[in-house]
Amino acid sequence: MGTFTKVVLTATLVVFLAVRWTAPRFDAESLRGARVLVTGASTGIGEQMAYHYARFGAQIVITARREKVLQQVAEKCLSLGAQKALYIAADMASESDPDKAVDFALENLGGLDYLVLNHIGPSPFSMWDGDVEHTRWLMKVNFFSYVQMAWRALASLEQSKGSLLIVSSLLGKMPSPFVAPYTSTKFALNGFFGALYHELAMNNSNVSISICTLGLIDTESAMDKVRGVTNVPAYPATDAALNIIITGATRQPELFYPWFTQIVTLSKDWFPSATNYIIQNSYNYNP
Ligand SMILES: NC(=O)c1ccc[n+]([C@@H]2O[C@H](COP(=O)([O-])OP(=O)(O)OC[C@H]3O[C@@H](n4cnc5c(N)ncnc54)[C@H](OP(=O)(O)O)[C@@H]3O)[C@@H](O)[C@H]2O)c1
Ligand SMILES: *[C@@H]1O[C@H](CO)[C@@H](O)[C@H](O)[C@H]1NC(C)=O
Ligand SMILES: *[C@@H]1O[C@H](CO)[C@@H](O)[C@H](O)[C@H]1NC(C)=O
């Protein structure tokens, strides 16, 4: 082995170990009794987050529109070890339901340690066809309700030195075809909560914000859309959920899951034409 190779390998190892050692350790005990509100928790990643928080012994409020399903998820949370598992049905397209859900959690848990904003409204996987009304509605569900709930919970999170978790997407960093309205809502989230992250830091706030960039995850709703359309690999919802929870508990500002979403985020700016070529050719599309 040449001297140069040795130096490069040693340097790589040192950087790797330094990153491992300085990464904050996740202490599962810190979530015992934690007061958590998870939105969009009737199914998918939100449901899996509820189960993980339950196993860690948290006190949970879950919300989504379908009350019957929420009831079943809450029951399972109790059987998994949640200290409390309550639910409230709420439609995040409404003006008042976002506040109602936060108030319910604040009253029943006596405050909040984690606000996990995760819900999304259903949106078609198809080329933009001019449906402005759908886009306006989706903005309410996927964006404005997040802004509203975060503000409503902020005072309590300041008191508890709590955390705000925003579940976003690679499509909040990089536009992608067939999902223009959805992509817009995720860009809006990254913009708004990126700004709020600075403001909280400048205020010496007690609250941490984590913005989570996810790639394709194997939830039913996502798989129904992309089956046969793309062969981008899908990652397990339960693992995505655990990674989001750990990111919040260790107060990290960002999560990239799976890891290569960070590479894609960089490559789209460094090698735009190559990235655009790959994006446009990763779908079965014949006009
Ligand atoms: N799956 C992926 O490939 C992927 C990739 C990147 C990012 N993400 C992000 O991960 C998060 C979770 O995604 P997912 O795939 O788990 O979604 P999902 O399975 O479709 O779940 C969406 C959740 O939101 C709720 N919801 C829908 N409309 C609502 C409304 N109007 N008001 C209140 N709640 C509503 C749904 O319950 P009800 O129907 O009962 O209301 C459900 O609990 C989202 O923020 C998504 O953008 C997912
Ligand atoms: C941060 O927490 C401390 C006590 O834990 C509290 O006294 C202080 O008011 C909080 N900061 C803000 C901005 O609320
Ligand atoms: C920052 O502090 C100022 C002054 O106390 C307050 O008015 C403002 O709402 C705070 N901003 C945030 C995002 O907490």
Image (cartoon, rainbow, N blue to C red):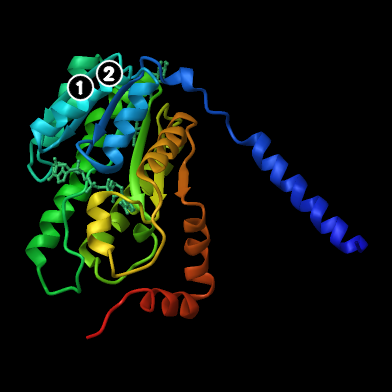
The residue beneath circle 1 is 75
Residue at figure coordinates x 33%, y 45% from the top left: 167
Quadrant assignment, res 233: bottom left
What label sits on residue 79 in the rendered view?
2
Which is more toward the observer, 222 or 94? 222
Quadrant assignment, res 111: top left
Identify whether 103 is placed above or below 123.
above
Is the shortest distance between ligand 1 and the CB of mark 1 under 8 Å? no
Identify whether 249 is placed above or below 222.
above
* Residue 192, position as x, y percentages in the image: 31, 49
Instruction: Note whether residue 184 is visible.
Output: no
Identify whether 105 is placed above or below 271.
above
Which is more toward the observer, 91 or 41? 41
* Residue 155, position as x, y percentages in the image: 29, 25
Residue at figure coordinates x 27%, y 64% from the top left: 227
Element class at badge 2: helix
* Residue 273, position as x, y percentages in the image: 47, 80
Left or right side of 19 for 209: left
Instruction: Note whether residue 50 is visible.
Output: yes
